[in-house]
Image (cartoon, helix red, strand yellow):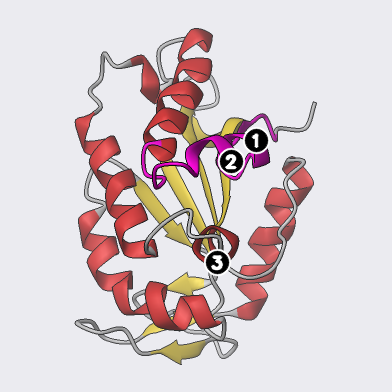
Amino acid sequence: MVGIIFARPNSPLAKSEIIPQLNDWHIRSGDHIDFYFVGYTYPHPPTQDYIEVDIPGSDPWLYSAKSFNALRKEIESRTTWQYGGGCELLLTNARFDSTAKAAYFDFSSAICCQLDAMKTDHAIQSIERFFETVFRFAESANDEDPTWGFSDSQGVSAVGSALKHVVLGLLPKGLDAEYKKTEHFAVRNVRLR
C-alpha cells in the first residue's frame, strides 16, 4: 500500500499538522506502507530549485514546486484524479509487474482524501490521528490478507472495501452515514480506461 501526499509547505494545514510530523511519519511508516511527500526530498539533491523546509527532529528537507507540479501532472495524465489544491492524500496499491520487472501504482482502487475538507468538516480529529490509523491498518495486514491486493484481481476490490471500512470507522458517531453519502472516503477507480 502507498500513500501519496500533496501538501505544499505554504499550505496552512501542511504548516500546522503535516510538516511538523514529516520525520516521524518517514520513520513510522516502516516496512508496511510507503508515504511519498510530493515535491519533498531528503537528503539534499544538487539542484537550485529547492527551498529548505525545517523539519523537527531532522535536518531540513527540501521542497521543489517544480517537482511537485511534475508529479501532479504525471499522476493526472495517468488517472482521472485531479488535484484540487490544498492538502490531499491518495491511498492506493503498489504492484510488481514480473514481466517488465518494474513496480507501479495501481490506481484501479484508490481512496482520494481531501485532507483540508475532512478536517474542516470534522470527519477526522487530526491529520496525525488519521495517518496513525492508516499506519496501523498497514501493519495489521499480512501477505495472505487479500486487502493488500497483490495476489489477484479479487484482492483489488477487497482492499477498497476493507480500507474504506477502516476509514469510515474513524468518523464520529452520527457522521458516518453523512460521509458515506458525500463520498469523502470513497474507493474509486481513477485509472484511465
Q: Position of residue 21 (x, y in %)?
A: 30, 72
> Which quadrant: the C terminus?
top right
The answer to whether any part of residue 114 appears in the image is: yes
| Mark 3 residue element | helix
Q: Are marks 2 and 1 in contact (CB under 8 Å)?
A: yes
Kind of residue sitting beneath label 1? Lys
Q: Are marks 3 and 2 in contact (CB under 8 Å)?
A: no
| Mark 1 residue element | helix
Q: Residues within 10 Å of mark 1 (few under 14, many from 20)?
A: few
Mark number displayed over residue 120 = 3
Kind of residue sitting beneath label 2? Glu
Give the residue number, with chain letter if any, for mark 1. Answer: 181
Q: Name which of mark 3 and mark 2 comes first in the sequence.
A: 3
Mark number displayed over residue 3 = none
Indicate left or right for 73 with 170 as reference.
right
Q: Residue at x 44, y 37 (%)?
A: 168
Mark number displayed over residue 178 = 2
Q: Position of residue 105 (x, y in %)?
A: 55, 37
What residue span does the magenta drawing correspond to?
A: 169-190
> Which quadrant: the N terminus?
top left
Indicate left or right for 72 with 14 as reference.
right
Indicate left or right for 88 with 133 as reference.
right
What's the CA distance linking mark 2 and mark 1?
A: 5 Å
